[in-house]
Amino acid sequence: MLSQDRAPIYEALKQYKANRIVPFDVPGHKMGRGNPELTEFLGAECMTADVNSSKPLDNLCHPVSVIKEAEQIAAEAFGARNAFFIVNGTTAAVQAMVLAVAKRGEKIIMPRNVHRSAINALILGGAVPVYVNPGVNKELGIPLGMTVEDVERAIKENPDAKAVFVNNPTYYGVCSDIKKIAELAHANGMYLLADEAHGTHFYFGDNMPLAGMHAGADLAAVSMHKSGGSLTQSSFLLTADTVSEGYIRQIINLMQTTSGSYLLMSSLDISRRNLALRGKEIFAKVQSYAEYMRSEINDIGGYYAFSKELCDGGAFYDFDITKLSVHTRDIGLAGIEVYDILRDRYGIQIEFGDIGNILAYVSIGDRELYLDRLIGALNDIKRIYSKDKTGMLDHEYINPIVRLSPQQAFYGKRKSIPIGESAGKISAEFVMCYPPGIPILAPGEQITEEILAYIRYAGDKGCFLTGTQDLEIKNIMILDV
């Protein structure tokens, strides 16, 4: 067994700095001396660690020494055959998974409530999605996971599909039965891909939903920078022994920078060590924080901080109790309205708000004082801002009408028209609220009056709409047919 006490990249950086190397290579700030304003802002320790690849520090694209050793230690920590350091965000890990298993024209079964990165991978590589509509909780209006039965049906109808893609968990913390779905996929000669952007802690905490690699996933994309404590944009791509290590690295190198940030890599290295040594303790505390807040918020009345009581063995198979997802519609406010009030009036920045819910991300960096501050603010908001909920939109997910593959639509002949005149047309671009970055509309899908009404409503409530060439979302690119 490899020692989880080690952090090879971090150790090599410390030695490199101790050797007082004179840099005649990039980056041009030369350990911060050339950019004093940035050094003052970020700190000298940070700037002196922002260095270039070299023999003592290895090379991310073709690691043979300290990065390779750090990847092997990380793989053991996660229970994977291989772990690849990703510095282009989990977007790059998700895209590498998709591009590695499905080529142009080949099918991949996936829920429609995937992150935009998965659909972007289809645009880049030309694979064709077979969408499984997620379950929907009508009370909360949120999309859930996939049922085993729906996945089985999709497999039977598409026996030539190359892989099944699973969110583990969704942005709201909902999990599908990933173990049974993995067994189904493998029994039919398909890979199982797990988007675990919000599931790093599943590998290290007790009483957690099942982690992808432990459930039999062939590849898993893990956002260490979310619940794992590393720097923003740093992630892991995990693989089982069912895929080629060399081929996966080649796929990653198609997209990932050749100038890997040692700030990001060392943050992955140190954070993995921290979780491997202290993860159970850390995430027990995170769970207790979230459960305390959930209980206090539900006692306010009007809000619903939901949890495992909604688990049904189907599309809501399991729930991540570290996710503090709170339904707000019963106080007459959209989630995005509560999100904005918390930031603008109370100085509290939560993860996201949609049209009926908010998500407060509870993590290893929280303090008890912060928990009570959020609870108190929500109490105030209900007392001061609540109103009649009549007329509020009550759902977050609309089943898509898919007419073309994302790649065909994105690269097809297209034109821009006013979005209000686009009903019945086929979209050639995305429309989504960010966060969470799940498309309302994706390339190749038919635009309907229901979708347009949702987009207008979300915009009026204050959601940050993205995806179109027109930054004001007044026009949309459609297929010119």
Image (cartoon, rainbow, N blue to C red):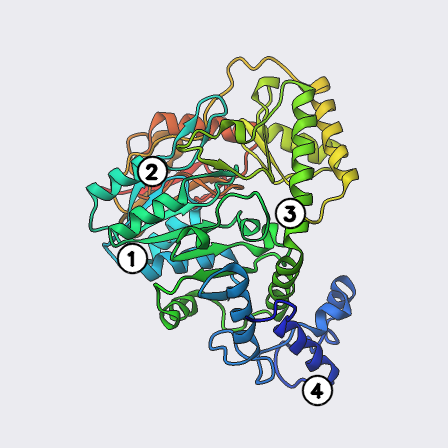
Can residue 36 be seen in the rendering of this structure?
Answer: no
Q: Quote the CA–CA distance across marks 3 and 1.
A: 35 Å
Are there few (<14), some (14-19), or many (20+) residues within 10 Å of tag 1? many
Mark 2 or 1: the one toward you = 2
x and y percent of residue 421 in the render? 35, 30
Question: Which residue in the protein does label 4 denote?
Answer: 22
Q: Quote the CA–CA distance across marks 4 and 3.
A: 42 Å
Query: Which numbered marker is on residue 283?
Result: 3
Question: Which residue in the protein does label 1 denote?
Answer: 102
Q: Residue at x 33, y 40 (%)?
A: 427
Question: Helix or strand or loop: what does disc 3 sit on?
Answer: helix
Are there few (<14), some (14-19), or many (20+) residues within 10 Å of tag 2? many
Q: Residue at x 76, y 33 (%)?
A: 372
Task: Compare marks 4 and 3 and give the one earlier in the sequence.
Answer: 4
Question: Which residue in the protein does label 2 denote?
Answer: 148
- The three-letter code of the residue at mark 3 reads Phe
Q: Quote the CA–CA distance across marks 1 and 4.
A: 46 Å
Q: Quote the CA–CA distance across marks 2 and 1.
A: 22 Å
- The three-letter code of the residue at mark 2 reads Val
Contact? badges 4 and 2 (CB < 8 Å)? no
Task: Compare marks 2 and 1 and give the one earlier in the sequence.
Answer: 1
Mark 4 or 3: the one toward you = 3
Are there few (<14), some (14-19), or many (20+) residues within 10 Å of tag 3? many
Q: Residue at x 75, y 28 (%)?
A: 376
Residue in front for this viewpoint, 148 or 31: 148
